[in-house]
Image (spheres, rainbow, N blue to C red):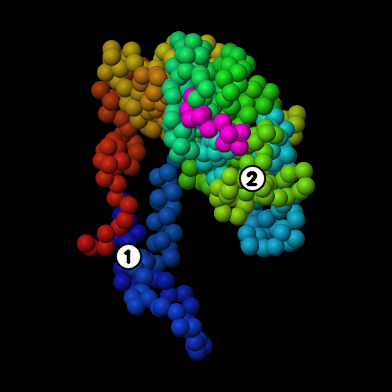
């Protein structure tokens, strides 16, 4: 497919209005000497160009999207309608606070709802993504220890199943990261945890259920041990969808939490973003919260705040979408998110495990991990090949090769918004691919055959990305 610049013909299109016949005197500002290099193309050709591009992208409206740990659930349209209300959509961040009362009330309501959902005492909505929420949380932990003059705490413990953003955030916050092993059940190895706890421990970062879809049976013991050593417990809430409304991180020993509004709270992400990664904490850490948030005396900035994480109020319209979602489900409806997410994942796991071995054969939470290690060794078909084969069925592949502790991993998260009929169709596709692996493995390794492009040079794309169009250079 040609780029829009390659379709451009000098002088074509764009001329909608007549020449301006009003004398305009521009202030003396530096003026550009040459016109910008914009594509010259007629309106209908431009419409077709972008429609063609849109058809090549796979979104939730195209089909099943089981990207593990990403919670690609349906985003109810009413969320968008509320966020599009002019009273919200047309606000300007520099408007005085007295003219923003409705918006501030929405922010305060969401903060309070998130406190109630997670068992925390305060929240900042500012962070613009999960990873920034993690960074914020670690700065809160740091501020807490520094304030107590407990400066020797330089280490953050992180299990080997963690998402890569966890060690990255800890390092950015100036901590040394210490890896904790998982045991054979996919949970934190308690002995390894005990061996690494010390007076240097600032905290532990944990995703629960973790990235293999397992809720850690020893969670109360884990948080107790960390507290006993003087550390704090950080809850990576990216997987909250599995327990929302049923388990509160604050009740199982966590001091700080981030949530991904663009996952659990049904806001679009990826190309449909932007995201939002609010960070909440227990009362001892509230004085360090960034940005403006609702405290006992109303909407204010904490005196000992770690400072702003983003400009102004953060991604405000995402808050409206998440708040709409929470209010439309209500206290009674929210636990059904988790119940149905877990039910759907177990349904798919049980149907698939006769064909593809599961990494941990036990009841899973909202997602499960298949390991194609044996299939790869015996049939020479990899997890990547199966992911590519799914494309020919119009299915977005699951997360591949993550978590790192499982070889040839495919991590599947159906979410609660998929119907049984859709899941059955996907299970059928997986079984057809399995039969092909046995009968004709070369065909699977050669897939996809129906997509506009087939196998890409992913290493070259990562190492030598072409990010700028080179105009005839
Ligand atoms: C377990 C976990 N933690 C953190 C993140 C980071 O979230 P974000 O992509 O919003 O920065 C993710 C994202 O997929 C995740 O799965």
Mark 2 secondary-structure assignment:
loop
The percent coordinates of residue 30 (x first, y second) are: 41, 78
Q: Which mark is residue 8?
A: 1
| Count of marks placed on residues | 2
The front one of 238 and 374 is: 238
Q: Quadrant of residue 448?
A: top left
Residue to which mark 2 is pinned: 304
Look at the image and say whether residue 323 sits in the magenta stretch: no
**Side of 199 where 49 appears, left or right:** left
Crowding around mark 2 (Cα neighbors within 10 Å: few <14, some 14 to 19, many 20+) is some
Question: Which residue is the extreme one toward the right?
Answer: 297
Closer to us: mark 1 or mark 2?
2
The front one of 122 and 375 is: 122
**Side of 31 where 141 appears, left or right:** right
Crowding around mark 1 (Cα neighbors within 10 Å: few <14, some 14 to 19, many 20+) is some
**Side of 359 where 80 appears, left or right:** right
- The magenta segment is 144-157
- Which residue does the image show at 54% across and 27% down from the upper left? 203
Mark 1 secondary-structure assignment:
loop
The percent coordinates of residue 200 (x first, y second) are: 50, 25
- Which residue does the image show at 75% across and 60% down from the upper left? 98
């Amino acid at each position: 497919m040609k780029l829009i610049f390659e379709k451009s013909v000098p002088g074509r299109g764009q001329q909608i209005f007549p020449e301006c016949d009003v004398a305009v005197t521009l202030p003396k500002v530096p003026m550009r000497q040459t016109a910008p290099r914009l594509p010259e193309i007629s309106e209908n050709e431009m419409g077709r160009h972008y429609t063609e591009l849109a058809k090549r992208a796979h979104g939730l409206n195209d089909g099943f999207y089981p990207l593990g740990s990403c919670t690609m659930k349906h985003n109810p349209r009413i969320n968008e309608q509320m966020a599009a209300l002019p009273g919200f959509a047309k606000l300007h961040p520099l408007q005085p606070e007295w003219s923003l009362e409705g918006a501030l009330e929405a922010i305060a309501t969401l903060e309070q709802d998130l406190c109630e959902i997670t068992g925390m005492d305060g929240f900042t909505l500012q962070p613009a993504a999960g990873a920034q929420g993690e960074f914020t949380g670690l700065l809160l932990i740091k501020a807490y220890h520094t304030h107590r003059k407990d400066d020797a705490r330089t280490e953050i413990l992180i299990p080997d199943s963690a998402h890569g953003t966890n060690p990255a955030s800890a390092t950015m916050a100036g901590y040394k990261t210490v890896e904790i092993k998982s045991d054979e059940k996919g949970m934190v190895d308690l002995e390894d945890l005990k061996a690494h706890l010390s007076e240097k421990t600032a905290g532990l970062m944990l995703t629960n259920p973790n990235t293999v879809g397992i809720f850690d049976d020893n969670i109360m013991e884990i948080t107790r041990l960390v507290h006993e050593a003087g550390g704090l417990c950080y809850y990576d809430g990216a997987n909250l969808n599995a327990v929302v409304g049923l388990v509160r991180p604050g009740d199982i020993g966590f001091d700080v939490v981030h949530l991904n509004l663009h996952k659990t709270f049904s806001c679009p992400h990826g190309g449909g973003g932007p995201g939002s990664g609010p960070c909440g904490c227990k009362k001892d850490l509230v004085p360090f919260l960034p940005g403006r948030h609702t405290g006992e005396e109303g909407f204010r900035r904490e005196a000992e705040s770690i400072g702003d994480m983003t400009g102004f109020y953060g991604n405000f319209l995402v808050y409206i979408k998440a708040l709409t979602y929470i209010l439309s489900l209500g206290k009674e409806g929210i636990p059904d998110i988790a119940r149905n997410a877990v039910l759907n994942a177990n349904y798919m796991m049980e149907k698939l495990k006769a064909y593809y071995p599961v990494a941990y054969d036990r009841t899973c939470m909202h997602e499960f991990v298949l390991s194609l290690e044996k299939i790869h060794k015996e049939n020479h078909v990899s997890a990547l090949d199966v992911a590519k084969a799914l494309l020919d069925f119009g299915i977005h592949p699951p997360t591949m090769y993550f978590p790192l502790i499982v070889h040839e991993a495919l991590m599947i998260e159906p979410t609660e918004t998929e119907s049984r009929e859709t899941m059955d169709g996907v299970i059928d596709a997986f079984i057809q691919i399995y039969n092909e692996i046995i009968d004709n493995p070369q065909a699977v390794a050669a897939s996809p055959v129906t997509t506009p492009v087939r196998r890409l040079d992913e290493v070259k794309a990562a190492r030598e990305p072409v990010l700028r169009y080179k105009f005839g250079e």
